[in-house]
Amino acid sequence: MKKVAFICVHNSCRSQIAEALGKHFAADVFESYSAGTEVRDQINQDAVRIMKELYGIDMERDQYSKTISHIPKPDIAISMGCDVGCPFIGQDFDADWNLDDPTGQSDAVFKDTIKEIENQILALKDSLKTN
């Protein structure tokens, strides 16, 4: 089974959401990991709250902020968006989802970002199932 890494700088919001949704929607097709080049003390609390509300997923139960060296070498590496500068992870990115960081924004912005990540996860799942 392929290992997919979702990468952003702080590994506290978008990449954590992608890891959680990957595990939720695509665990039968790929393994999901998230990481960053820096870490935060905790996952973004708005993301945690809204993911619980929308999907019943408690990201803090099984996930934590971690660097690239704390995950297996991925088969597929996806950048969440390079608006803050793409980290180098030892390999090229297979895709850049180019998502704006919703940190500090309204719940509506968070929900739009989460829905876009869900759509991308489902598309990735479909593409890997056909390959």
Image (cartoon, helix red, strand yellow):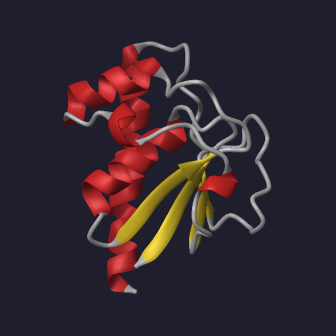
Residue 35 location in percent, x, y? 60, 48
- Residue 97 in view of the camera: no
* Quadrant occupied by the C terminus: bottom left
Q: Is residue 63 above or below residue 131?
A: above
- Say which residue appears at 72% left-offset and 43% top-offset: 82
Q: Along the horizontal axis of the image, is 56 left or right of 105?
A: left
Of 40 and 114, the residue lying toward us: 40
- Say which residue appears at 55% left-offset and 20% top-offset: 103
Of 42 and 109, the residue lying toward us: 42
- Say which residue appears at 80% left-offset and 55% top-offset: 88
* Quadrant occupied by the N terminus: bottom left
- Residue 116 in view of the camera: yes
Quarter of the figure with residue 95 = bottom right
Q: Is residue 50 above or below residue 26?
A: above
Quarter of the figure with residue 123 = bottom left
Residue 52 location in percent, x, y? 25, 28
Q: Is residue 59 above or below residue 22?
A: above
Q: Along the horizontal axis of the image, is 114 left or right of 56?
A: right
Residue 86 location in percent, x, y? 76, 47
Residue 92 location in percent, x, y? 74, 67
Residue extending furthest toward the bottom: 131
Quarter of the figure with residue 84 = top right
Q: Is residue 107 above or below residue 94?
A: above
Q: Along the horizontal axis of the image, is 120 left or right of 72?
A: left
- Say which residue appears at 39% left-offset and 31% top-offset: 112
